[in-house]
Amino acid sequence: MSTYVYAITAASHPSLPEGMGGVGEPALPVRVLKEGELAAIVSDAPEGLRPKRRDLLAHQNVLSEAEGGGPVLPMRFGSVAQDDAAVTGVLAERVEHYLERLEALAGKVEYNVKASHDEEAILHRVMAENPEIRAVTEANRQAGGGTYEQRLRLGELVVAAVQSREAEDAVEIQHTLQPVADAVSVGPESTGWLANVSFLVDRKSAEVFFTAVEQVRKSHPHLDVRVNGPLPPYSFVEPGPSEPAGTTTGSESGRE
């Protein structure tokens, strides 16, 4: 049977509560596979696994319980290996890497930051910043709205200016928050968001990170900045970036 992987830990990691259940209906028993200095928290993989609320919560519950005993390398929901031997094989093959990651991520959490433009505010901003847009707008106004070609030209100028501002704002958000984080991982492009970036933050420094986020909001009133976290540091475990080689991965957490 396939093996569902929740996390990688040190072999010395405290045991989970006896009888703890994970994904599946009914919940499949969670167990630990040890290989040298490492261990993997796993269960059997249920047939037809889908990202249903119950299984997403079960996955998160196992991670939360495991994190209470020390650093873990969290797997994303849906990480499945062929069998137990495949999991222990990866642990043996990548022992140095995973031990380094466990040390690097100890006491760290992930915050995912997404940002988008307030439509009305960004239009006012590009108008104020772009003399050509102001000139074309005024010419169209004096011409009673302008011809179709003139209105099309204005639209093209506005779209280009907004896209340019999106790129600039995305870079500025990352550069502003990067100094108060230990690492940065840029997420995939997502419809509706100009930035999708995860930051690795020491739990004890979370207040400093949120202060920096508030500074971004105050200095960029045309932005809608949203923070999701604290999350397990999914985005900072390699490869993939967060699942053992040889697993198949379902939906991601926190970065959609």
Image (cartoon, helix red, strand yellow):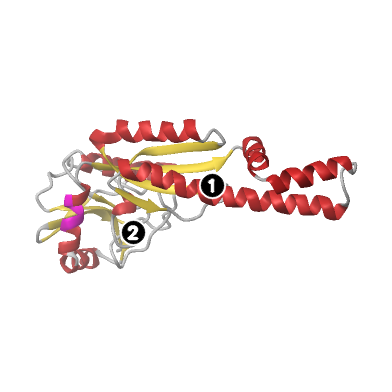
Who comes first in sequence, dot 2 or dot 1?
A: 1
Q: Position of residue 40 (x, y in %)?
A: 20, 55
User: Is 223 located above or below residue 161 in the figure?
Assistant: above
Q: Main secondary structure of the magenta part?
A: helix
Q: Amino acid at mark 1?
A: Trp
User: Is 88 located above or below residue 28 in the figure?
Assistant: below
Instruction: Using the numbered discs, state the Cα–Cα distance from disc 2 to disc 1 in whole angstroms.
Output: 21 Å
Residue nearer the viewer, 169 or 89: 169
Residue located 64% across and 39% down the image? 119
- Secondary structure under the numbered disc 1 in the rendered image: loop
User: Is 77 located above or below residue 219 in the figure?
Assistant: below
Verify whether residue 166 appears in magenta.
no
Q: Quadrant of residue 67?
A: top left
Judge whether residue 255 can be spotted in this image. Answer: no
- Secondary structure under the numbered disc 2 in the rendered image: loop
- The residue that disc 1 covers is 193
Q: Which residues are magenta?
A: 99-103
Q: How many marks?
A: 2
Q: Position of residue 47 (x, y in %)?
A: 39, 58
Residue nearer the viewer, 184 or 135: 135
Q: Position of residue 245 (x, y in %)?
A: 29, 66
Q: Amino acid at mark 2?
A: Pro
On the rendered structure, is 252 left or right of 122? left
On the rendered structure, is 100 left or right of 236? left
Res. 241 mark = 2
Please tell me how crowded label 2 is: few (under 14), some (14-19), or many (20+) other residues with Cα within 10 Å.
some
Residue located 41% across and 39% down the image? 228
Please tell me how crowded label 1 is: few (under 14), some (14-19), or many (20+) other residues with Cα within 10 Å.
some
Asked if the residues shown at circle 2 and circle 1 are in contact, with their CB atoms under 8 angstroms apart, the answer is no
